[in-house]
Amino acid sequence: MTIVLASAESPAGHAARDYAVEEAKRRDADLLVFPVDGSSPDPAQFGYDRVSVQTPDERSKDAVGDLIDMTTRGDIEVVVVGVRRRSPVGKMFLGSSAQQIILESGVPVITVKPAQGEG
């Protein structure tokens, strides 16, 4: 099976990365890193030998939509995404990539917050 990491270069993204690696090891699963922020992650930085990177279609203007479409594949078990702390009003008025993934994913989503004071 495969775990998908919605990768982003942010404190929340780093927390999600660390969690996804540990979860992949625990489940003995492959880890597919999907950058939703335009970054280019290096699989060697994850410290896990079953990591691959898949980038959004270069013609696409919606990386999050590409990730959500990927969740319909039969081998995807779960998506891990980092979330930042926001006030209730901020949650109501400001959409986010994480929120879209949580609401539209075809598989369960694990959300990870950075440690207190990191983001």
Image (cartoon, rainbow, N blue to C red):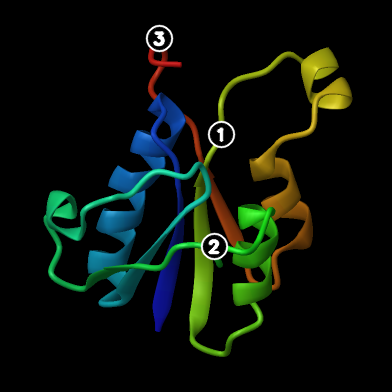
Residue 115 is situated, as x and y percent measured from the top left of the image, at 38, 22
> What's the mark number on residue 117?
3
Image side of residue 74 versus residue 9, left or right: right
Crowding near the residue tagged with mark 1, few <14, some 14–19, many ≥20 C-alpha atoms within 10 Å: many
Q: Nearer the viewer, residue 53 or 83?
A: 53
Image side of residue 103 versus residue 45, left or right: right
Which residue occupies 33% across, 49% down?
40
Label count reads: 3
Which residue is disc 2 drawn over?
A: 58
Crowding near the residue tagged with mark 3, few <14, some 14–19, many ≥20 C-alpha atoms within 10 Å: few
The residue tagged with tag 2: helix, strand or loop? loop
The residue tagged with tag 1: helix, strand or loop? loop
Which residue occupies 49% across, 87% down?
75
Looking at the image, which residue sits at the far top? 117
Q: Amino acid at mark 1?
A: Val
- Mark 2–mark 3 distance (CA, rounded to whole Å): 35 Å
Quarter assignment of residue 95: top right
Which residue is disc 1 drawn over?
A: 83
Residue 36 is situated, as x and y percent measured from the top left of the image, at 53, 49
